[in-house]
Amino acid sequence: MKRGHQITMKEIAKKLGVSVSTISRALKDSPELHPETKRKIVEMAKEMNYQPNLLAQSLRISRSKTLGVIVPEITSHFFASCISGIQDYANKRGYNVMICQSNESIDQEKANIRTLVSSQVDGLLISLSRETNKFDHLYELYNREINFVLFDRVHEEIPVSKVTFNDVGGAYQVTHHLLEGNNRRIVYVSGPEDLYISKKRKEGYLKALAEYGIENDPLLIKISDLTLEDNVRVAREITEMDPRPDAVFCMIDPVAVDVLTEWKSMGIKIPEDMALAGFTNNPTSAVIEPPLTTVAQPGYEMGKLAVTHLLDQLDGLASEDPISIVLETTLVPRKSSQHFQVK
Amino acid sequence: MKRGHQITMKEIAKKLGVSVSTISRALKDSPELHPETKRKIVEMAKEMNYQPNLLAQSLRISRSKTLGVIVPEITSHFFASCISGIQDYANKRGYNVMICQSNESIDQEKANIRTLVSSQVDGLLISLSRETNKFDHLYELYNREINFVLFDRVHEEIPVSKVTFNDVGGAYQVTHHLLEGNNRRIVYVSGPEDLYISKKRKEGYLKALAEYGIENDPLLIKISDLTLEDNVRVAREITEMDPRPDAVFCMIDPVAVDVLTEWKSMGIKIPEDMALAGFTNNPTSAVIEPPLTTVAQPGYEMGKLAVTHLLDQLDGLASEDPISIVLETTLVPRKSSQHFQVK
DNA sequence: CTGTTAGCGCTTTCAG
DNA sequence: CTGAAAGCGCTAACAG
């Protein structure tokens, strides 16, 4: 299919009998131009419906005014919120955004980086896939001096700017909340152990327990690979524990939802039989029965901060030295954790 | 901040003592090249970690291999699914995707189109904002022979390809389902009347009623502007109707959720007091209490079909004549509509 | 104040 | 089989 012809500066120039550079100058409002010429050009450009060719412009100035974003999956409400924040604040500063999803695959993540770099993005915002346990591709970016910021799912060691939540604090908040509700035997359902958030949230969980003088009991830590099947397996195992735990804290809401659903089908009542809590505050968690106690993570805000910092670096408004921005989370207490209260 | 230097063909050429055109030919596997030369070049390119500058390439061949996507909002699960389908199938065919959200604003929609066109996308996939009731910007694209496909929120009159759901059919399905459950006084909660889906779903609703010999009663049609406040207003008005309706069919799930939540707070029991149904099958609808009867719309599939058709047109695999693809929906009966069954 | 020139990185005739 | 040259649309010295 043929594509529609776009007006170029050359055509405006010919029509007006001036040179292309004069057009260029007029359109970027250069001061050293006769006002009348400028006016005529701007008018004509409008009349002919001129739209600059950003490709040519980018090639020329070696800046594409485009950012690349890589998220594990776009259909997750949390990442969609991040993207939304990134978009809004990138656009505000005249940048476009190309979005890719890794689908939780490291190979896809690498491929995404490759195409975005080829597309000459000025910088990247990356949230790592679950599979990513080697980081050569990130170090390569780093060595090639390509600007990028990691957010949410980060790799701690690499010296680039990162935006994360206070995962330790959030896990502490929710565990503390469960302890205050008189729960003592509290299970932590973790994701794969090499995941950043698995570790951090465990840390917060243990910290809260320690404050209550409760020793770390490895039997109370369950690990799921985060698939529905494995979440169900964990849910069942928990019901078979003796004595039965008072409460269960799942690393992310979807796990808690799967666990809750499985328990419901087994006739286990929440919060009567056990307290349950998650982490993320997905929309689903508010409407499920019972509503799920969780920890809210402002995704839009995270996206906004990440992109703003990246652009500040690109525009020379922020130092090139990597910084770490930590966002606080908020406990959202709901019915699912009112175990002893309703007993 | 300085950006990392990228290897160019020129540099490979110098290193190997050949011309740039030879590099270009070797890298696109031209047959008229000495195999040995080709091998050496490919090897060197790999060693130097060459990555083509897509900007330069696009400028030269006047095809960017990039598509533009505009959706009302990325945080909606339905649109996120569409995007996911678009991404996957665009990538499979070597295309990148730039995504924009209009935030339900026609001005933002126009601005998005402008930047995407400036970015030289090869085609556009657009789902219109709620505000869009004038279509000049679409006709302009059409007149400039820029390829685009409309999906989900379309403008019927314009002669371009469209991908939609069988909205009439879906609304018919759900209304028919309510009628089969012996509900007779059925309210339809519509969105703004000039919205495409408002009209189409009303059509299906009336069609099902007609089959049961029920006359169109304008008093049973409520219109909400889809904000929370207005949904709540409608929810209250319905409870004051005399006689109280048997069932309520809301044009989209979020309205049904707001209505349900309001009713719950008023002590009205669903489905005991009234049947309720929505449309879209949002994740939320499955977990709310009671689970919401609704109509499933496969978003991923819609994205896939829309992008595949657009690419087929671009690549000359499909005729340029606009076509209309209509996806069927599936009724998802859940507890919220079992009014007379549980009475 | 404005035109000429060169060149961003790449592809593609046209010669040889 | 390979090189030279032109040019995609734009910007930015450098002249005048």
Image (tube, coloured by chain):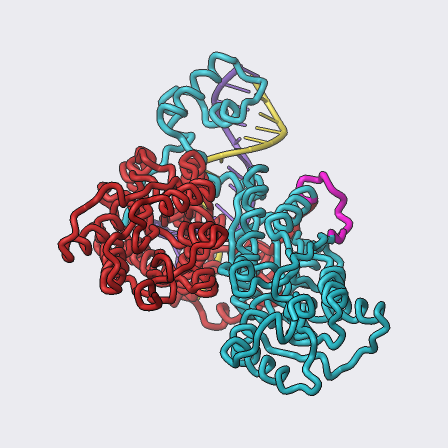
Chain colours: A red, B cyan, C yellow, D purple
The image quarter containing residue B205 is bottom right
**Residue A60 placement (x, y as % from top left):** 43, 47
Q: Residue B321 in magenta? A: yes
Left or right: A73 with respect to A128?
right
Left or right: A247 with respect to A71?
left
**Residue B105 placement (x, y as % from top left):** 55, 70
Left or right: C15 with respect to A208?
right
- By secondary structure, the bulk of the magenta-drawn segment is best described as loop
Image vertical order of residue A133 relative to residue A126, above or below = above
Q: Is residue A129 visible?
A: no
Residue numbers of the magenta segment: B313-325
- Location of the C terminus of chain B by quadrant is bottom right
Q: How many marks?
A: 0
Left or right: B296 with respect to B182?
left
Q: Nearer the viewer, residue B323 or A157?
A: A157
The image quarter containing residue B171 is bottom right
Residue, x 37% and y 67% (percent of image)?
A: A334
Residue, x 68% and y 66% (percent of image)?
A: B341
**Residue B180 placement (x, y as % from top left):** 76, 65
Q: Nearer the viewer, residue B296 or A122?
A: B296
Q: Nearer the viewer, residue A327 or B72?
A: A327
Q: Is residue B223 visible?
A: yes
Residue, x 32% and y 35% (percent of image)?
A: A133
Residue, x 41% and y 40% (percent of image)?
A: A113
Q: Nearer the viewer, residue A85 or A195?
A: A195
The image quarter containing residue B172 is bottom right
Image vertical order of residue A130 relative to residue A20, above or below = above
Q: Residue B335 in magenta? A: no
**Residue B23 placement (x, y as % from top left):** 47, 25
